[in-house]
Amino acid sequence: MPVTMQRVCFQLQVRPERLEEYTRRHRAVWPEMLRALSSTGWHNYSLFLREDGLLVGYFETPDLQAALAGMDETDVNARWQAEMAEFFADLGEARPDTGFTQLAEIFHLEDQLDPEGQDS
C-alpha cells in the first residue's frame, strides 16, 4: 500500500545582504545533514529564493510532526540551525526549522483531475 505524502510549503525571509553566502552554503550542504533529512522523512525537498530574500521551501513527508521531531533529535540539525539562524530576518528566538511560516495548500492539479482523464 502506497504511503500518503503530505505536501508542505513554507516561507522565511533571508537577509538581503546575506543572499550570496546563503546560496553558496546550499550548494554544498553537509552530507550528514542530507542523510538526516532523508532518513527522517523529508522528501522531494526544494528551496526557492527571490532576489529580495523571500525563501520558499517545499517538501513531502508522510508525517510533518514526525519529520520535525526526527530532525530535532539529530546533532547535525542543531549545528546546521545554529549556523543558518544568522541568515534570517524576523525569527526572534526561533530556529529556522521552527520559525518558518507554513503556507496552506489551496490547489493541487492531480487532486482535481478525473482519474479516467475525462473532464468533470
Image: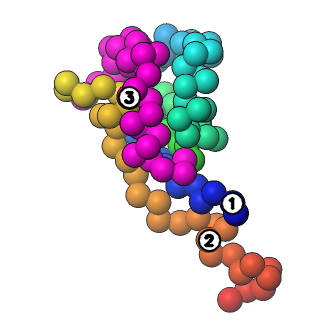
**Mostly what secondary structure, the magenta segment?**
helix
Q: CA distance from mark 1 to mark 2?
A: 16 Å
Say which residue appears at 41% left-offset and 37% top-offset: 68
Q: How busy is the neighbourhood of tag 1: few (under 14 within 10 Å), some, or many (20 plus)?
A: few
Residue on which disc 1 sits: 2
Q: Amino acid at mark 1?
A: Pro
Q: Which residue is mark 3?
A: 72
Q: Residue at x 54, y 19 (%)?
A: 33
Query: Is 45 covered by the magenta stretch?
Result: no
Which region shows up in magenta? 61-90
> Is residue 2 in view from this perspective?
yes
Give 39 or 14, whichever is nearer the viewer.
Answer: 39
Write down the residue under mark 2.
111
Indicate the quadrant where residue 98 lies.
Answer: top left
State the image coordinates of residue 92 (x, y, percent, origin top left).
19, 26
User: Looking at the image, is mark 2 or mark 3 nearer the viewer?
Assistant: 3
Quarter containing the C terminus: bottom right
